[in-house]
Image (cartoon, rainbow, N blue to C red):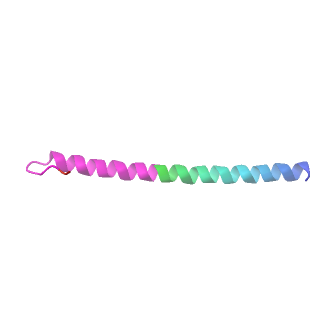
């Protein structure tokens, strides 16, 4: 394998790793946003007058 082939393979590998990390980070962000939305809904329900406590 020539040096040029090694460089190209390495660049392709780095691109794949970067794409995998970006996908993982996006999934984490989406999960955090969902969790925050649920937390806001539960907080609103608890502060409403006359509402029962959600358990």
Query: Where is residue 35 shown, x and y percent of the image?
Result: 36, 50
Query: Where is residue 27 shown, x and y percent of the image?
Result: 49, 53
Instruction: Give the camera-side residue of 24 and 54.
Output: 54
Query: Where is residue 14 shown, x and y percent of the image?
Result: 71, 49
Q: Quadrant of residue 12?
A: bottom right
Give the residue furthest to the left.
Answer: 50
Looking at the image, residue 26 sits to the left or right of residue 7; the answer is left
Residue at 15% from the left image edge and 49% from the top image edge = 53
Label total for image: 0
The answer to if 35 sits in the magenta stretch is yes
Looking at the image, residue 50 sits to the left or right of residue 25; the answer is left
Looking at the image, residue 44 sits to the left or right of residue 23; the answer is left
Residue at 68% from the left image edge and 54% from the top image edge = 16
Looking at the image, residue 4 sits to the left or right of residue 12; the answer is right
Q: Look at the image and give the residue range highlighted in magenta.
A: 29-53
Residue at 32% from the left image edge and 51% from the top image edge = 37
Give the residue furthest to the front.
Answer: 55
Query: Where is residue 43 shown, x and y percent of the image?
Result: 23, 46
Instruction: Give the main secondary structure of the magenta stretch.
Output: helix
Residue at 21% from the left image edge and 48% from the top image edge = 44
């Amino acid at each position: 394998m020539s040096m040029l082939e090694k460089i190209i393979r390495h660049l392709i590998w780095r691109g794949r790793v970067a794409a995998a990390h970006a996908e993982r980070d996006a999934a984490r962000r989406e999960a955090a946003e969902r969790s925050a939305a649920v937390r806001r809904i539960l907080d609103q329900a608890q502060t409403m007058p006359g509402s029962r406590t959600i358990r």
